[in-house]
Amino acid sequence: MMAVDDKGRFIPGDKLLVLFAREAGAKKVITTMDASMIIEETGAEVIRTKIGDSFVSVELKNGGEFGGEPSGSWMFPENSLCPDGIYAAARLVAITGGTRISDLVDDIPEYPIRRSSVRMTKLDTAGLEEILMSLKPVSTDNKDGIKLIFDDGWALIRPSGTEPKLRLTVEGKDREVLRNLHDECLTIINEFVKDR
């Protein structure tokens, strides 16, 4: 379930994720590796899973008041551990009963995200993480590909589940951080793929 606000603007999935987590009063939120870092700013404990709503559902069995991924899959465990678009739409209507949705959406920060992909016939990423470490991330997470985490952004590099490509998703606190991190990662990935 995706939505537009009362001004006719598309609401990004990451903002819906925050909106639903806030509305549910979630102390623990389950989401995917590619969801925006704004979810951490809700103050809830955030557990990240591999990309795919089935992974979110499985993790919700261990607890959490809300789960979802920015592609539009929303799970309210008091109702169901499966994504339920009709139920999510009803919850969104209930939220907007007393407040303009545009005001709620505008109150949620938005960091720029960029997605790219590089064609790679043999999806073998052995050795790529070692090269990417030259970017000096604060930490890494290998639940689903290689996620490099920095103070002001992150980059996720993972093989596509549907095409012979490496997917790159980058988020930065501002456009300059995003551009620099994206371009550095893309340069490293292109060099790595060229040598394969």
Image: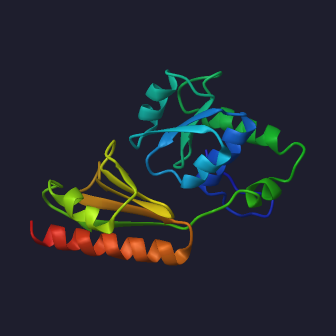
Residue at image coords 49%, 73%: 177
Is residue 164 visible in the rendered structure shown here?
no
In the image, residue 77 above or below residue 32: above
Residue at image coords 17%, 68%: 192
Residue farthest to the left, as pictured: 196
In the image, residue 153 above or below residue 85: below
Residue at image coords 66%, 43%: 43
Residue 134 position by quadrant: bottom left
Q: In this orientation, which residue lies closer to the viewer: 44 or 156?
A: 44
Q: In this orientation, which residue lies closer to the viewer: 94 or 56?
A: 56
Is residue 86 visible in the rendered structure shown here?
yes
Residue 167 position by quadrant: bottom left
Q: Position of residue 187 (x, y in %)?
A: 27, 75
In the image, residue 21 above or below residue 190: above
Q: How many marks?
A: 0
Q: Position of residue 62 (x, y in %)?
A: 49, 21
Q: In this orientation, which residue lies closer to the viewer: 136 or 187?
A: 136
Placement of the N terminus among the 4 image quadrants: top right
Residue farthest to the right, as pictured: 98
Residue at image coords 51%, 26%: 60
Placement of the C terminus among the 4 image quadrants: bottom left
Q: Position of residue 45 (x, y in %)?
A: 58, 37
The colour mode here is rainbow
Q: Position of residue 132 (x, y in %)?
A: 26, 63
Relative to 89, is 179 on the left or the right? left
